[in-house]
Image (cartoon, coloured by chain):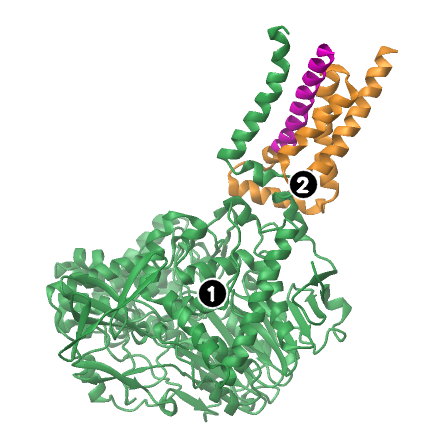
Chain colours: A green, B orange
């Protein structure tokens, strides 16, 4: 044959070689494969009635997806109910579920590669993966004798099987979610241990932090001045839902003012561990989050229906998909509606036929994370004069050592910094929530919560005749030398955790005489409380709670729509409400043109942070400049600014609203107190009047420079951004302008253009106890995690516009009206 | 007469490539669609031009048939999502899918035609 006759077949071979090379070095061939690649995922986007055969089911389960996309799961047995929940949730949220599991277990590298090494190492070091395994083991070991553990074991195993069946189903139909296909990884099979890892993640999000390390570093710089900087009790707060508003308990105050002096080695370790905290949360979700929340319960004698109303508004970082998945679960002895987390089969916040409940984070209390400086010698630690062997763990390829107090977070020679975190106490909060899902009264509800350990939460409760609130958790009591628990403590045995506050003494109230309860992250109990309960150093001031109390005091009879409107559109800034009248007295008579303009705007203002308000912008930036001139100037004068910034981080006002800064409730409280008392001492030698006037001038100069036309409305600086959970900015939604600020119910800190708030009330819920079927709620997001789905972000505009959706609550699938239905999925037993 | 034979050969080859290609796609091993072009060219034996054209067009037709099995309403938004994540235009991604399938079938057809010729010559 002639050479040229080989040219054409050689071209054919070359094409094949090019395609094979393309497939070997890029994921294109697997992604574009017509029968297994991404185009098959268009099947996942179909919304319509379907019947699915699942081998793990024992009887038929009917899943009604209502017109808003919410799933209502009806099963004749409990096992199938949780199985179906796992299947349905994974159908819409498998990527999210698996990422939460990996995040909790410190195994992010499995999916996202070695760039998550530091996060996985830190997460493993905290003990969360170890505790998740212990939690599940404890459930299994105790299920024969403990009803909660038995319920949990059955629910968790069924739920896990449901998730895994969804994975099998997707694999057999080539519809594994797009992210897995693009990353070239297979979903892993879920186990209950991962659910407990999710429990750990939530405890970390709500009750985990380096507050004590920051305090210790600050104390090493400022000494006793730290107590002015971060006071134990607020000078502003007057409402404590749990009482004890009497005089300061001097023993408790003395304890807070008895900070253990650390040496340079411990200080160095503290800085080291503080630095490691920067790896948490993982960088795939690199937006600032806030963990505040609102809860209000109003008694029947103050509502238009004569029955209680419960309002829930957990403030968490936003994401698409949302952290919440909205469902109704109906099975034997259970008919409950609300929101579940990815990877946990219990309705966290919701209602059933008889009760409603919601959760908020408690005041910080050192974020439930206590640090001790402990002496080590080789593989032993010293406790009360005796050396004991360290406990070694090898997890995720990392070596972790524990003393009797917890994991060794850092070690230098024989000195170690050990963390005693409430999240490392073996516990079964998922089981507690499963129990309260079917609770029928306060006594049962309260009893179920008695085994709640962490995170520190307030549980608001309402039924048709009563309202209540309780903050169950493991609040440590310190014995021995009782150094300040808000700082690093000695770990040689002179101070120790001797137990926890008795359940009857944790903050709680039933049917208070004023007819309402507000528990929105403020300190629950007053300065007269006989137990150490944290300081003002934390994530939330109490201004929002005070505003909510003011509203309820001024509205003696409220309707459900009043509460909906209040939650969604009341933008009253409590700090402005009390500070601006005082600020106006400082500005009065000043002839500076900027000051006169500010005076004119502020004097006619109703303290609402509405998007069209000019005065709102003047207040916000005045407050921020005042914060800066008061606190940052002091740090500068004392030569502490550089050290402070490099270790603790630059603070800014209103919860750290400026980009790359952090918030500290104490300083917001200190500032408001200074304005109200007219005394900036001990933070500044300048008069309050001169500080305020100067701040106003700076604020007006900034605003006029930014908007020379003078149209610097608040909406130009504030709005909400809803970021894609996986960091895919193409699928972010927003920013969208909306009123409010750090002191209003959507209390997200931030300011445009570089720090748009990315958090707020992640689930707004108002339950009408006169008829729970007439309740409303909305969360910013959608039921699907798939950006191509019409259900990816369909609730965002509803949330922005405060269009609460009816929480459709029907006891059976047959009673579900057709005109309220989007589709029906029949899950039937059968082999694949 | 010659042209008629070529056209009918092209159509038969196209049908073989398309049907065999779709069937082979359902093995989930994409590279196997190469065999559809190869088989068609061996069966029809109408030279490089006919086999190349029918191979490529048949490959594209095979993808179109796969599309018919999918809910097309959602395909655009899905491919936009994939394109956004991958950093490649969704149109380019779709075009690549057609090109790869067409290319594999075409390669099979060219190789098949060559094999036919070698066999014929050796006889």
Q: Is residue A377 magenta?
A: no
Q: Main secondary structure of the magenta part?
A: helix
Q: Is residue A528 above or below residue A784?
A: below
Q: Residue furthest front?
A: B123
Q: Which residues are magenta?
A: B95-123
Write down the residue under mark 1. A194
Q: How many marks are shown on the rendered structure?
A: 2
Q: Chain of mark 1?
A: A
Q: Quadrant of the C terminus of chain B?
A: top right
Q: Quadrant of residue A662?
A: bottom left
Q: Is residue B102 covered in magenta?
A: yes
Q: Quadrant of the N terminus of chain B?
A: top right
Q: Does dot 1 land on a helix, a strand or a loop?
A: helix
Residue A221 in the image: x percent, y percent?
A: 14, 65
Of the numbered discs in the image, which one, if any, rests on residue B27?
A: 2
Q: Would residue A529 be found to the left or right of residue A516 on screen?
A: left
**A775 in relation to A755, above or below:** below
Q: Residue furthest right?
A: B1
Residue A557 image position (x, y, % from top left): 55, 86
Residue B56, relative to residue A695: is it above or below?
above
Residue visible at 55% across and 46% down?
A: A181
Residue A245 occupies quadrant: bottom left
- Mark 2: secondary structure: loop
Q: Nearer the viewer, residue A122 or B8?
A: B8
């Amino acid at each position: 044959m002639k050479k040229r006759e080989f040219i054409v077949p050689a071209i054919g071979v070359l094409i094949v070689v090019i395609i094979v090379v393309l497939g070997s070095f890029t994921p294109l061939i697997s992604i574009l494969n017509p029968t297994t690649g991404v185009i098959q995922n268009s099947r996942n986007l179909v919304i319509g009635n379907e019947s699915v055969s699942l081998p793990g089911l024992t009887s038929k389960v009917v899943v009604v997806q209502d017109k808003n996309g919410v799933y209502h799961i009806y099963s004749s047995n409990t096992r199938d109910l949780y199985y179906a929940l796992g299947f349905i949730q994974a159908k819409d949220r498998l990527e999210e579920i698996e990422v939460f599991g990996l995040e909790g277990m410190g195994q992010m590298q499995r999916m996202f590669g070695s760039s998550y090494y530091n996060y996985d190492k830190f997460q493993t070091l905290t003990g969360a993966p170890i505790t998740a395994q212990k939690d599940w083991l404890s459930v299994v070991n105790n299920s024969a004798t403990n009803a909660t553990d038995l319920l949990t074991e059955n629910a968790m195993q069924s739920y896990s099987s449901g998730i895994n069946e969804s994975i099998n189903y997707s694999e057999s139909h080539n519809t594994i979610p797009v992210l897995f296909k693009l990353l070239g990884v297979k979903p892993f099979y879920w186990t209950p241990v991962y659910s407990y890892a999710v429990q750990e993640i939530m405890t970390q999000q709500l009750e985990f932090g380096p507050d004590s390390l920051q305090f210790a570093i600050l104390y090493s710089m400022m000494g006793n001045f730290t107590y002015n900087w971060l006071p134990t009790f607020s000078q502003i707060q007057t409402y404590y839902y749990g009482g004890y508003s009497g005089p300061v308990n001097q023993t408790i105050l003395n304890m807070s003012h008895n900070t253990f002096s650390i040496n340079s080695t411990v200080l160095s370790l503290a800085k080291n561990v503080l630095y490691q905290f920067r790896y948490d949360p993982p960088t795939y979700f690199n937006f600032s989050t806030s963990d505040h929340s609102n809860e209000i319960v109003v008694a029947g004698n103050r509502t238009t229906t004569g029955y209680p109303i419960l309002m829930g508004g957990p403030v968490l970082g936003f994401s698409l998909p949302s952290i919440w998945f909205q469902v109704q679960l109906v099975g034997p002895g259970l008919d409950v509606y609300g929101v579940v987390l990815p990877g946990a089969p219990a309705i966290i916040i919701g209602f059933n036929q008889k009760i409603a409940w919601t959760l908020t984070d408690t005041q910080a209390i050192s974020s439930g994370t206590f640090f001790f400086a402990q002496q080590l010698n080789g593989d032993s630690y010293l406790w009360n004069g005796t050396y004991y062997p360290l406990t070694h763990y090898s997890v995720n390829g990392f070596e972790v050592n524990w003393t009797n107090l917890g994991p060794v977070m850092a070690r230098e020679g024989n000195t170690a910094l050990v963390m005693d975190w409430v999240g490392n106490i073996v516990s079964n909060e998922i089981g507690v929530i499963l129990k309260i899902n079917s609770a029928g009264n306060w006594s049962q509800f309260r009893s179920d919560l008695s085994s709640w350990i962490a995170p520190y939460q307030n549980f608001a409760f309402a039924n048709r005749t009563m309202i209540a609130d309780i903050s169950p958790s493991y609040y440590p009591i310190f014995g021995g030398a009782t150094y300040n628990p808000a700082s690093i403590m000695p770990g040689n045995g002179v101070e120790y955790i001797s137990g926890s506050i008795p359940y009857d003494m944790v903050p709680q109230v039933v049917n208070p005489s004023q007819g309402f309860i507000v528990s929105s992250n403020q300190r629950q109990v007053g300065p007269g409380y006989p137990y150490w309960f944290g300081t003002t150093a934390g994530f939330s001031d109490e201004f929002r709670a005070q505003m909510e109390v003011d509203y309820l005091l001024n509205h003696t009879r409220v309707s459900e729509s009043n509460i909906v409107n209040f939650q969604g559109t009341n933008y009253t800034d409590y700090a402005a409400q009390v500070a601006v009248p005082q600020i106006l007295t400082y500005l009065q008579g000043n002839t500076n043109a900027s000051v006169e303009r500010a005076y004119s705007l502020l004097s006619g203002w109703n303290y609402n942070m509405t998007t069209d308000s000019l005065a709102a912008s003047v207040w916000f930036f005045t407050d921020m400049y005042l914060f800066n001139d008061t606190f940052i100037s002091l740090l500068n004068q004392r030569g502490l600014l550089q050290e402070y910034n490099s270790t603790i981080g630059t603070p800014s006002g209103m919860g750290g609203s400026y980009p790359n800064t952090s918030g500290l409730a104490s300083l917001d409280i200190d500032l408001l107190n200074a304005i109200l008392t007219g005394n900036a001492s001990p933070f500044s030698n300048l008069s309050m009047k001169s500080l305020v006037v100067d701040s106003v001038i700076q604020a007006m100069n900034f605003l006029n420079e930014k908007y020379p036309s003078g149209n610097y409305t608040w909406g130009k600086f504030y709005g909400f951004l809803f970021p894609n959970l996986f960091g895919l900015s193409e699928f972010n939604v927003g920013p969208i302008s909306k009123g409010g600020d750090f002191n209003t119910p959507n209390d997200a800190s931030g300011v445009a253009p570089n720090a748009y708030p990315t958090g707020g009330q992640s689930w707004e819920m108002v339950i009408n106890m006169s008829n729970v079927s007439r309740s409303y709620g909305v969360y910013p997001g959608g039921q699907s995690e798939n950006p191509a789905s019409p259900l990816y972000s369909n609730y965002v505009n509803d949330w922005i516009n405060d269009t609460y959706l009816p929480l459709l609550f029907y006891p059976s699938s047959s009673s579900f009206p057709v005109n309220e239905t989007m589709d029906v999925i029949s899950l039937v037993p059968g082999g694949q | 007469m010659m042209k008629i034979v070529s056209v009918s050969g092209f159509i038969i080859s196209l049908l073989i490539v398309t049907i065999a290609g779709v069937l082979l796609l359902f093995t989930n091993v994409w590279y196997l669609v190469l065999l559809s072009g190869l088989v068609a060219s061996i069966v029809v034996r109408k030279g490089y031009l006919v086999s190349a054209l029918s191979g490529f067009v048949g490959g594209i037709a095979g993808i179109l048939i796969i599309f018919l099995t999918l809910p097309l309403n959602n395909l655009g938004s899905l491919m936009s999502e994939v394109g956004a994540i991958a950093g490649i235009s969704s149109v380019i991604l779709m075009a690549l899918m057609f090109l790869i399938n067409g290319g594999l079938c075409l390669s099979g057809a060219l190789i098949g035609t060559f094999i036919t010729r070698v066999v014929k010559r050796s006889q």
